[in-house]
Amino acid sequence: MSFANGVTTASFQVTVLDDSAYEGDERVNLSLSNPSGGAVIGTNSAADLIITEDDQAPASGQIEFSLNTYAADEFTGSVTIEVVRQNGSTGIAMVNYTTSDATATAGNDYIVNSGTLIFADDEILKSFDVTLNDDANFEGIETFNLTLSNVFGALLGDITSASVSLSDDDDPPAAGAVVFTESIQSVSEDGNSATISVSREGGSAGAISVDYTTMDGSATASSDYTFSTGRISFAAGEAVSKSFDVAIINDTQLEGDEQLALQLVNPQGGAVLGTQSLSQLTITDDEAQSSSAILAFTVNSLSVGESSAVANISISRANVMTGSVTVDLSVESTTAVSGTDFNVTTGTLQFVDGESQKNISVEIIDNTLEDGNKTITFTIGNATGVAVIDTANSTVTLTILDDDGTTNSGNGDSGGGGGIDLLLLAFLLSLTLLLYKPGLILSPMR
């Protein structure tokens, strides 16, 4: 750069190249050197030119457990836990993991484990092992928890908590194990009470007992049922089922079905808790049918020709029109092939406030094959938003009538020769009438 006599400012240009790769902000070093004409280098003889990034940063991803629940046998020695990085893998990322007790206890059933997983750039899978203790005690299925936390360089995904289920390889003691006879059961809200059975299995030596208790779920004690706790006893050699009752409170509120949990605890007399020491009781709402939106197919069956462009199926909403409700539509069974014989969009349908009907269009695909009639059965389920499904009208069968081939059970020309057959039939009918015309006698030829 040259400065003429009396000139105090001069400039030069640096050409910046715009690429499409994300690189972050970048720097160019600028320096002045080799002055001449009696000038000297001043204090600002170096500078930085910062090129600011204008491209979108690539996704660093989300880190989560690969499963909600892992399973292992007590005797396998260890269980491997996988952690995945999804929806992006740019840059280094780290996450902490730890174990914690549930029904399994650290030191007795497994060895506590915690640490940090480091994902390199583009790395999408890491794992760690948890050591298991194989004891000689029958304990049924036990679980411990896993947790991810303190992520760096990425985000936490949806599955940040998981559990490990340990299967027991030991036999129940001679006194046996106590379990709920049913893992899931239900009772109507107007049924007054539910009878819960408890069984003794795997042994019957000696007298044993076990405590039971109820726990709130979506159902609440004193509002939906009466809290219940107590003890069940089995005499020596007694291996029959015993039972207790849970009183149900019948209110007039529209709440939908609600659940409470039942638990066995504190076995005595040498007995242990079996694998089914928890049970769920569902209280079915008796107000739902009269005070809810009732969802149903408008017909149970319909037929369309193969040459039809579409078949229309309707789901009606009756009784209550206020509020938003949803229902899932699915194909329950089909002899037709999706994409070859028909196309349809299934999934969750939403009825907005005041909406009384949903129409589903099934695209019918016409082919030239003689492949017979095809059927598709649709079903609705999983109603939400205080809606119920009319079980008598929860399915509809669509029949696609084949229009190809050389035979036809219907009226009209059946594909060749039909017109001649009709003429022959008319001739024979006329001849018959002629032969049997009154007064006409035909004598045999002599």
Image (cartoon, grey):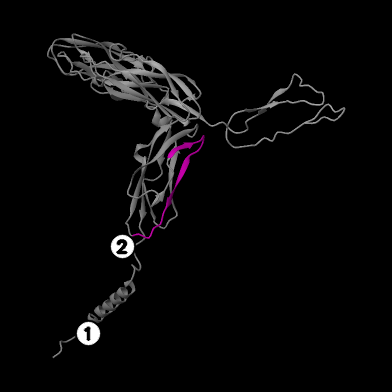
Which portion, as a residue range, is magenta?
A: 347-369
* 350, above or below 284, in the image: below
Q: Where is residue 349 shown, x and y percent of the image? A: 45, 38
Give the mark nearer the N terminus: 2 vs 1: 2
- Check disc 2 and give the amino acid type: Ser
Q: How many labels does the image show?
A: 2
User: Where is residue 153 shown, x and y percent of the image?
Assistant: 51, 23
Left or right of residue 144: residue 198: left
Q: Does the magenta stretch include residue 366?
A: yes
Q: What element carries label 2?
A: loop
| Residue sitting nearer the eye, 339 or 402 | 339
Residue 377 sits in quarter: top left
* Disc 1 residue crowd, few under 14, some 14–19, many 20+, Cα 10 Å: few
Q: Which amino acid does label 1 sit on?
A: Leu
Question: Magenta segment: does it hold 384?
Answer: no
Q: Taking the image as drawn, is residue 237 in sight?
A: yes
Judging by the rendered image, the residue that carries numbered circle 1 is: 440
Image coords of residue 27 (percent x, y): 64, 27
Q: Residue 409 carries which label?
A: 2
Relative side of 5 to 388, left or right = right
